[in-house]
Amino acid sequence: MSHAATAHDDHHDHDHHMPTGFKRWFMSTNHKDIGTLYLIFSLTMLFIGGAMALVIRAELFQPGLQFVDPHFFNQMTTMHALIMVFGAVMPGFVGFANWMIPLMVGAPDMALPRMNNWSFWILPFAFSILLLSFFVPGGAPAAGWTLYAPLTIQGGMSVDMGIVAIHMMGISSIMGAINVIVTVLNMRAPGMTLMKMPMFVWTWLITAFLLIAVMPVFAGAVTMLLTDRHFGTAFFNPAGGGDPVLYQHIFWFFGHPEVYIMILPAFGIISHIIPTFARKPLFGYSSMVFATAAIAFLSFIVWAHHMFTVGMPLQGELFFMYATMLISVPTGVKVFNWVTTMWRGSMTFETPMLYAIGVVFLFTLGGLSGLMLAITPADFQYHDTYFVVAHFHYVLFSGAVMAMMGGAFYWLPKWTGHMYNETLGKIHFWLTAIFFNITFFPQHFLGLAGMPRRYADYPLQFTEFNQWSSIGAFGLGISQLLFVYIIVATVRGGKKATKEVWDNPEGLEWTVPSPAPFHTFDEPPVVK
Amino acid sequence: MASHTQDQYFVPDSSVYPFLCSIALFCIAMGGASYLNGYSWGPNLMTAGLLAMAVMLFIWFRTVILESPDYNMDVDKSFRMGMAWFIFSEVMFFAAFFGALYYIRMLAIPWLADTEILWPGFEATWPSAGPLGAELLAKGTPDTTAIAEGTKYSLVDPWHLPLYNTLILLASSVTLTIAHHALRANNRKQLIIWLAITVALGVWFLFLQAEEYIEAYNHLGLTLGTGVYGSTFFMLTGFHGFHVTLGAFILFVVLLRCMRGHFTPERHFVFEAGAWYWHFVDTVWVGLFIFVYVL
Amino acid sequence: MTNLPLKFNKIVKFLTVFGGLLFSAAAFAEYRLNFQDPVTQTARDIFSLHMLIFWICVAIFVLVFGVMFYSIFKHRKSKNYEPAQFSHSTKVEVVWTIIPFIILVAMAIPATQVLIKMEDTTKSDLTIKITGYQWKWGYEYLDSGIDFYSTLATPREQIDQFDTERAVPQGENYLLEVDKHLVVPSGRKVRALITANDVIHAWWIPAFGTKKDAIPGYINELWFNVDEGKEGIYRGQCAELCGKDHAFMPIVVEVVTGEQFEQWVAAGGSFENVENLATETEPPVETNETALIEKLVPAANAAETEPETEATSSVTYTMEDLMATGEKVSATCVACHGAEGKGIPGVFPAIAGSAMAKGPVEDHINIVMYGKPGTAMQAFAAQLSDEEIAAIVTYQRNAYGNDTGDVVLPSDIQAKRK
Ligand code: HEA
Ligand code: HEA
Ligand code: CUA
Ligand SMILES: [Cu+2]
């Protein structure tokens, strides 16, 4: 990278005023403001999606239909997942990327700032369309977030709205990912070689690659749905020679890498928090990088483990079983490295560290249940039961979402310039962790005992655990109000944060003042 | 506000285009979805969105062009990388459709033929419009046991229009490369001539493709609804045609800019981006020619 | 798991017994923690495999987090622990890449064995075609030609609890009862060909260890062989989201001895003459619906009992008969079109005031008999009798305020078949 000064036209003035109002928030080209927008958006979506989860849990509190009819229940399940996945988790991580990557690589901003703003602003409009679909005849999409054909072929207008909304989210994600890749590859400070990059930057680089590789595939899948619905094509219609299972293959070719898109940045965040609070460098940096790359590579060849029951040929089942199991190896390497980073460190347990430990512990639990799912013959029993629901909430909520919460506490002082209230932070962690387990641990048992997922109503023997789960969910939901309170309070005031915030943390972001000024790195920092 | 926070980096001013483009996108998407479901205002909303988008992109790109003297080589590199990754995303989009073609042809059709209880008499061949074919489907025939012995449609002969189209596109890649060399050699006249030829070839391709479609619909009985063969055929060639249109448009704009004297032998990102795109479109066509027409 | 290496067998047995003890502890009486008791060799193989993998995972978990928590308690700043500064070691990295890999191989071997056994559908004694519909199952015994549909039998009043006043307490087999059981013999390899009519469903009996998707247009295979001595009733549910009533299309399989099964087949699918049914077996639930149909449709019983109504055509149907029957039989239709014929706008059209239900009779009969391809409206010609279709159409044309006054006779329907 050459940063030798090129000729500079001097017709630009050099004032560093921060724009305000509409100009600041709607027209921004500033990575920090756009990052903030992404994070606020993500939190909003977490609440909307969470509210839908609470409707699900309320209905499932008892057998029988008490609150919503099954059609609406299916809308809740579908929209809950779409909103959480595409509205809460993915934009949340993009928010982190926006805020932190330029700070971490010593760049003044993202490489393509206007496109960055566009990536963000597409999202509120995409989700408006998705949410508006509740108000068209027939209500929102109700075929599950996987939108399997032919059930989606039957749906009403909302399916089309869902499809166009997905196209918009896809455009947004691809542009966001291109921006990340270009920033990382082209804007690093002098001296920051690839193998000196912070882990979060590495995980995002690989995540961005996954995004660009699979979002278009998803777009292709839903495009085929659209033409099957309206233009007489027969991709998924056996009478015309198509195959409903084709949809599943294309969807999961996207869908499996998608789940790693939702977890790799979380791994990155954890890899920052643990060394800071263990006061010890990250163990096995280069093996962490390779493990991330290996996970990304493997994620492309395991998709059919979601489809063991569709009746694949035996060889196919074996291939996908073996490939899926292999992912445990690089993931294990990561877990072992984190544990070894803690080993003989000098640990303290501020809120971010609690979150990091919680994530490692609970994610591994979810990962191990994932490994059980990968065992094809056993998956015939687990598939489409609450065991799967338990698995993916362990990796998604206690993996991805809790990692974001930990990351938020970790960098909040850098973002706002204030320390958050440590006691409240710890309380929030414990409430979240405990209620989370009350909600989702019993779902393992429900699944093993035979409760299918996406059920608006269930036989009597599943009652008790469902009640646990529902109670936990409401506790979990209410606990998140505390999260919002802490954030708002920290933005508005609190103890001034120092430049370094923590005890001698590593990384360029700690070399700039807190809050990080509107424009950082007027001079490219030099990394040794 | 000034864009340069320091000498090496270029950070553009705040800009309202992204926000307005998002609104336009919203109108296109929402209008489209309503259109498909029979709302009379759907097409209007969609057209308004498309127009707004076109105008916005025009202004946006114009701004970028006006700014471009300010860009340093880093910005240029960012743009290049951005374009390369965008093309990669397009490759993956086509991969989904090629994958679908492969799956249907090699796996699904043979499986369907194996399920004799459901589709007695259906045989695995390619091309195939499936056990019931398009006509029966379209009519919504009640009698699902009546198996069409293959609906009446014929195929596009690969050795006529598609072959010409292959040659045209390959030739256009060559002419484009000649134009690029001319640009590097700062030979304006050559540049404009060869670029113009390239655009003309692109348009000619589109013209022949349209002719092929008309032929298919009117005489061969091959339509989007001709079972899965029609689906894969038209979706793959259709999306490709759409990309050719886009590529030709980009090159046309580049041509206009060349005529205005834009670009230098050293700095011509947009030219190269357009060229990459064109080569990509060309490559996809070769894939189409082999897998959709010939095999 | 007969062909596992000896050691695995032992480990699995030990762990299974141990696990079984743990999981069936009295304290958990009403909390079922693990798989339903397996009744086929396949299900037992799966269960052992599941427990084996489970315990390996537990071991890994305990080990990894044992180390982590030890570290958390020992290596903390509050104990003035000085941080070490090591940051890599190729040796341990290699070790903890290879050991997990070996563990995975050890898991993959038994998994592969079980899978290969499961996928072997050859040498079956009996073949049943299972078809998923929104929202019921169709069964067809390909060897004997017996076929019937199997629909949820739990009354609506138990399900709808919106209004606590009207709600009825739920029965023991709430949502797990159907009007007609699938009957299969024990000790024989039953092969099922699974497909669907509209959307994807999945046929799942946990105790048999079988789950397969039912995919429209394609046929999937599965097999099960229930142990002799395990005759009884086994229940399962649809395991693939198939729309609104996905939770309401259970599967009930009645396993009888081979002998009883033959008697059942000989009687054309009736238990009337079958003797010595196991004590657990119960007669299929007879819903009000089926009972009423038999009472109200003259042809159903009349043909055999009363000589003067030999041919269907000679029965006289009154509008009242047809309306009454229609109201009952259209329970099938109500699933989508709603009890008041209002449907769900945008998804299922209303019958009340529908152009089709008030327009030409011909079209109305057509859509009911042949459905509309590509929509949830399926072809009912094969599922319902002439009388039922006639009754339903008559009902829809006169109920819900449609009041066309049209009467459709079974003979009209009969004429349209073929
Ligand atoms: C963040 C998201 C995320 C992540 C990270 C994962 C991780 C994994 N998942 Fe999960 N999964 C989902 C999200 C995720 N999953 C979702 C959303 C679904 C459901 C989709 C739907 O149907 O709606 C799903 C469903 C799903 C299925 C399909 C189940 C079914 O429908 O029948 C399977 C099957 O193989 C599976 C497997 C795995 C495996 C093997 C991993 C592995 O990556 C886990 C690896 C981690 C570990 C194993 C733990 C740590 C390792 C060690 C401590 C080392 C030592 C270990 C050993 C040697 C064993 N997942
Ligand atoms: C990142 C993704 C993500 C996240 C974070 C969550 C979070 C939660 N999910 Fe999610 N879920 C999915 C992804 C996710 N889920 C997916 C992919 C599916 C599969 C869908 C399908 O089958 O198609 C699914 C399905 C799913 C089901 C199965 C539905 C079914 O099969 O029918 C259930 C049931 O319990 C559930 C529950 C929950 C709960 C209780 C939370 C909680 O963690 C949410 C907690 C957060 C809040 C609740 C915040 C909101 C707070 C308020 C609104 C304030 C509350 C105020 C008061 C109560 C006063 N989810
Ligand atoms: Cu049938 Cu779910
Ligand atoms: Cu997966």
Image: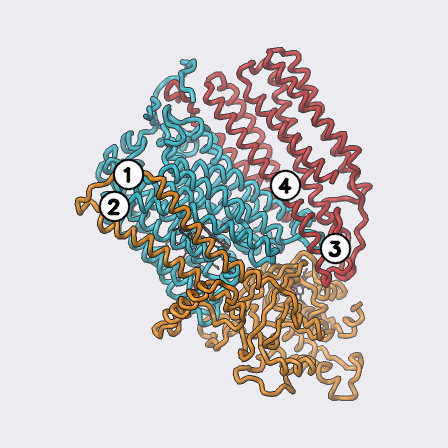
Chain colours: A cyan, B red, C orange
Which residue position is annotated with label 4?
A: B43
Task: Please state the chain letter of the residue tagged with numbered disc 2 in the rendered image.
Answer: A
Disc 2 versus disc 4: distance between alpha carbons? 56 Å
**Mark 4 residue crowding within 10 angstroms, few (<14) / some (14–19) / many (20+):** many
Q: Secondary structure at mark 3?
A: loop
- Judging by the rendered image, the residue that carries numbered circle 3 is B131
Q: CA distance from mark 4 to mark 3?
A: 35 Å
Q: Which mark is residue A350?
A: 2
Within-10-Å neighbours for mark 2: few <14, some 14–19, many 20+: some
**Chain at numbered mark 3:** B
Horizontal side of A107 relative to B105 (left or right) equals left
> Closer to the observer: label 3 or label 1?
1
Q: Amino acid at mark 3?
A: Pro
Residue placed most toward the observer, C2 or B208 = C2
Q: CA distance from mark 1 to mark 4?
A: 65 Å
Does the rendering let one see residue A161?
Answer: no
Q: Nearer the viewer, mark 2 or mark 4?
A: 2
Q: Nearer the viewer, residue B240 or B254?
A: B240
Q: Do the numbered discs 1 and 4 sit on residues whose CB atoms are within 8 Å?
A: no
Of C40 and C350, nearer the camera is: C40
Amino acid found under the numbered disc labelled 4: Pro
Q: Is residue C172 left or right of residue C262?
A: left
Residue holding disc 1: C86
